[in-house]
Amino acid sequence: MRTFILLAAVTTLAACTWVPLAPNAKAVRVVAAGVAPANCQKQGEVAVSVKDKVAFYERNDLRVRDELETLARNEAPGIQADTIQPLGAPANGEQRFAAYRCGR
């Protein structure tokens, strides 16, 4: 019984990750997928990933999407970007974003 409780606790904790937004990423804007934002210079692409499954447990899709977006926002300032745009839907805990400098 103790083994089961320990396994359940480890699985629950492993499934919960928290991705904090970096201070310099707070100004990074997220635009909807589709047409590239006007008057912006493309700085590159950002690929991010998080765990979407832990053993037999599938994480909440909304939480996974939120964490992927936060990770992409955290990466954007490193390539002098102030705007990100998803290039597609998340798949297997991974997602790519285009990064732009729009000079807002």
Image (tube, rainbow, N blue to C red):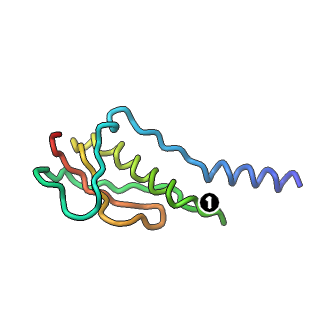
Which of the 4 quarters of the picture holds residue 54? bottom right
* Image-based side of 32 in relation to 35, left or right: right
Spot occupied by residue 80 in the image (x, y as percentages of width and height): 21, 41
Q: Residue at x 33, y 38 (%)?
A: 25
Name the one closer to the observer, 45 or 87. Answer: 87
**Identity of the residue furthest to the top in this view:** 23
Q: Residue at x 68, y 52 (%)?
A: 12
Q: Residue at x 27, y 40 (%)?
A: 77
Spot occupied by residue 70 in the image (x, y as percentages of width and height): 40, 47
Q: Residue at x 40, y 47 (%)?
A: 71
Spot occupied by residue 32 in the image (x, y as percentages of width and height): 29, 58
Vertical comparison of 35 with 104: above or below: below
* Image-based side of 28 in relation to 103, left or right: right
**Quadrant of the image containing the C terminus:** top left
Vertical comparison of 103 with 35: above or below: above
Considering the numbered disc 1 on the image, is that residue within a helix, a strand or a loop? strand
* Image-based side of 69 in relation to 58, left or right: left
Q: Amino acid at mark 1?
A: Val
Disc 1: which residue = 54
Q: Residues within 10 Å of mark 1 (few under 14, many from 20)?
A: some
**Quadrant of the image containing the N terminus:** bottom right
**Identity of the residue furthest to the right in this view:** 1
* Image-based side of 99 in relation to 26, left or right: left
Which of the 4 quarters of the picture holds residue 73? top left
Spot occupied by residue 90 in the image (x, y as percentages of width and height): 42, 64
Count of marks overlaid on the render? 1
